[in-house]
Amino acid sequence: MVQKVDHIGIAVKNLDEALKFYEDVLGLKCAGSEVVEEQKVKVAFLPIGDTEVELLESTEEDGPIAKYVEKKGEGIQHIAYRVANIEEAIEEMKSKGIRMIDEKPRYGAGGAKIAFLHPKSTHGVLIELCERD
């Protein structure tokens, strides 16, 4: 079902400052950024091989990324796995007793269809399923 690691989501306080590190120190290049209003987040994409690092900065004080950074600090927030059909993947997870945060796909950055699995069902890791056209 899972095809590959699609991206690793990293929560940051300041996207511009974080980009300096990833670009100037690690040598990655930002392939673009966007604001996803419904998730209250600004995202920057840094391709590396056939996956990418996704930097996430909250656009609102009450956004999920702001809450994450406040509680746990900056760092890896989620790992996204690519699937061919997200609706089928959600149903398969549910049939295996996995608790879903998203029962139906929603819009994600880069035009992806996404759904999150609850960390209580995944040994503490926030996992995102991701379908791209």
Image (cartoon, helix red, strand yellow):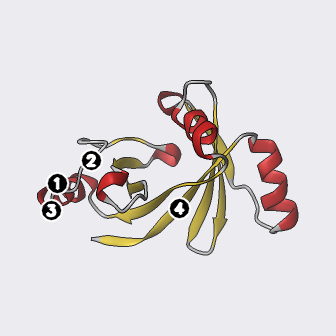
Question: For this rendering, which residue is in front, 85 or 43?
Answer: 43
Which amino acid type is marked by label 1?
Lys
- 96 sits to left or right of 89: left
Residue position marked by numbered label 4 in the rendering: 7
Q: Residue at x 25, y 41 (%)?
A: 104
Q: Earlier in the sequence, mark 2 or mark 4?
A: 4
Please tell me whether residue 27 is drawn above or below residue 114 in the rendered image: below
On the image, the x and y values in percent for residue 52 come to 60, 63
Where residue 97 sits in the image (x, y, percent)?
16, 57
Residue 36: quarter of image: top right
Q: Amino acid at mark 2?
A: Met
Q: Are marks 1 and 2 in contact (CB under 8 Å)?
A: yes
Q: Quadrant of the N terminus?
A: bottom left
Distance from the alpha carbon under mark 1 to that under mark 2: 7 Å
Residue assigned mark 3? 96
Horizontal side, residue 36 vs residue 59: left or right: left
Is label 4 or label 3 in front? 3
Q: Secondary structure at mark 4?
A: strand
In the foreground, 29 or 26: 26
On residue 19, the disc is: none
